[in-house]
Amino acid sequence: MNTFTDSAATALALVAGLDPMLLSIVTRSLAVSGAACALACGIGLPLGAWIGVSRFAGRGALLTLLNTLLALPSVVVGLVVYLLLSHSGPLGFLGWLFSFKAMVLAQALLVLPVAAALTRQAVEDADRAHGEQLASLGARAALRGLLLAWDERYALVTVVIACFGRAVSEVGAVMIVGGNIDGFTRVMTTAIALETTKGDLPLALALGMVLLFVVLSLNATIALLARWRGAATSSPLMVKGAAA
Amino acid sequence: MSGVMQLKAVDVRFGAVQALTRVDLRLAAGERLALIGANGSGKSTLLRVLHGLLRPTSGSVLRDSAMRQAMVFQRPYMLRATALTNVALGLWIAGSRWKHAREKALRALDRVGLADAALRRAGELSGGQQQRLALARAWSLQPDVLLLDEPTSSLDPHAKRDVESLMADFAQTGMTVVFASHNLGQVKRLATRVVYLEHGRVLADLPVHDFFNRSVLGETSREADLFLKGELA
């Protein structure tokens, strides 16, 4: 118990004192996850909106695949990206392995299905309710998807926040493709794992506090958005708090 | 084809449900056609076929290729945007430039008495105002045929009167109006012709005056007779 309380006190001091190493890890972590989230949402939101309003052969199979990918283990994504980026892999010529870019790519692939699947659901529900009226104005499927996505923008902000939460709290993919290199590819989750094994509990706890704070802030934002939209209950899309 | 639109032996089936059965209908320019019948009789399905939102399972729909049409729904859908944007959007989808669309939209809002609400969010408007907004959106497209699916059924009497008055105004301009309604008073006031549907079949298609001759309907259908007495919702 003493170890825990001592460690917690030291961790608080690190956070309060804006420890440079802590700040560097937190900043890198937010940058990696922010870039991954932007990339994944840039593709996933329009893709999800299109799937939401389109009807084509094989759509059911695609939805099953998309929903399956929601539960994609981050270590599997890390492994696949590692194989792609390794020297003998098809993308080895890029030289991205153990770099910031590799971590962004891995996290983007991890959250892309989340962005696409949740957007698809929101837009499809909206299309079922209102799509006919947009169609009566002459809007074809692609335009309908765009308009409904815009109309569901508050729900889609929640999707973006959920994607960021998933990205920032995962550890498996960035550990494999980033290598957890000090001052270069070390992010909050990989640092927590490393410092815990090394026995440096204060730094691990301090990082854990920051990570919890980030996730808490995201959930608070989602709840505020839900209230702003006049939702009776809080959003079901709460961010996973535990590192995946 | 004579008239602006013609349906020939149209069948619509949703799985095991036969929504329309061998419907023949010819729509003449400038007429005001009321579709009446109990819930589930096929009124909304017929409107959707007329607007091209539903393709018949069999039969054919013939339209004048130059004809423009617009539809107003019972509960109009408005985007989370201003009233002006919602009207302009319809015009933009129809091919107008955005700036031009906004100018036309303002005129349409003025036409339905909502000019003051142009910059208010559509969702903040009352039910009656939203229905007038939907009418402005439809009217702004300058349709030859205006289709309305129970446009006043969820409105209070005051809002009902406003919307009905606009429908009458639009009809005065020579626009062909087809509307579904449960309100027989409204049908008498607005329609020139009445189509009575029962279980997806057209049981009567008569000028409004003839339709409200009970002896004619009594021979046609007991259900129609009950409908006219207000005993069938």
Image (cartoon, coloured by chain):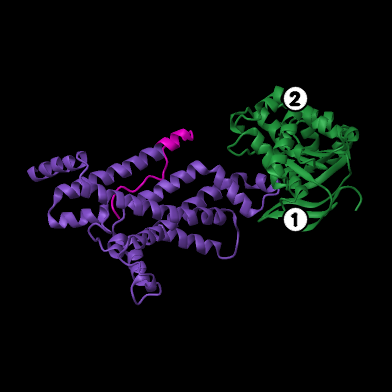
Q: Position of residue A86 (x, y in %)?
A: 33, 72
Q: Position of residue B228 (x, y in %)?
A: 80, 32
Would you identify the image quadrant in which residue A104 lies? bottom left
Residue B56: mark: 1
Would you identify the image quadrant in which residue B147 lies? top right
Q: CA distance from mark 2 to mark 1?
A: 34 Å
Marks 2 & 1, CB-CB < 8 Å contact: no
What SS does tag 1 mark?
Answer: loop
Q: Nearer the viewer, residue A162 or A127?
A: A162
In the image, the chain rendered in green is B
Residue B161: mark: 2
Residue type, numbered disc 1: Pro
Q: Position of residue A163 (x, y in %)?
A: 40, 51
Q: Nearer the viewer, residue B118 or A120?
A: B118
Magenta stretch contains residue A229: yes
Magenta stretch contains residue A28: no
Please say if A69 is above or below A123.
Answer: below
Q: Which residues are magenta?
A: A224-244
Q: Is residue A105 left or right of residue A129?
A: left
Q: Quadrant of the C terminus of chain B?
A: top right
In the image, the chain rendered in purple is A
Mark 2 vs mark 1, foreground winner is 2
In percent of the image, x 41 and y 53: which residue is there? A37
In percent of the image, x 64 and y 29: which residue is there? B127
- Disc 2 crowd, CA 10 A, few/some/many (<14, 14-19, 20+): some
Q: Residue under mark 2: which chain is it in? A: B
Q: Is residue A65 left or right of residue B218?
A: left
Q: Residue furthest top?
A: B158
Q: Residue under mark 1: which chain is it in? A: B
Chain-order first, disc 2 or disc 1:
1
Please say if A204 is above or below B174.
Answer: below
Residue type, numbered disc 2: Arg
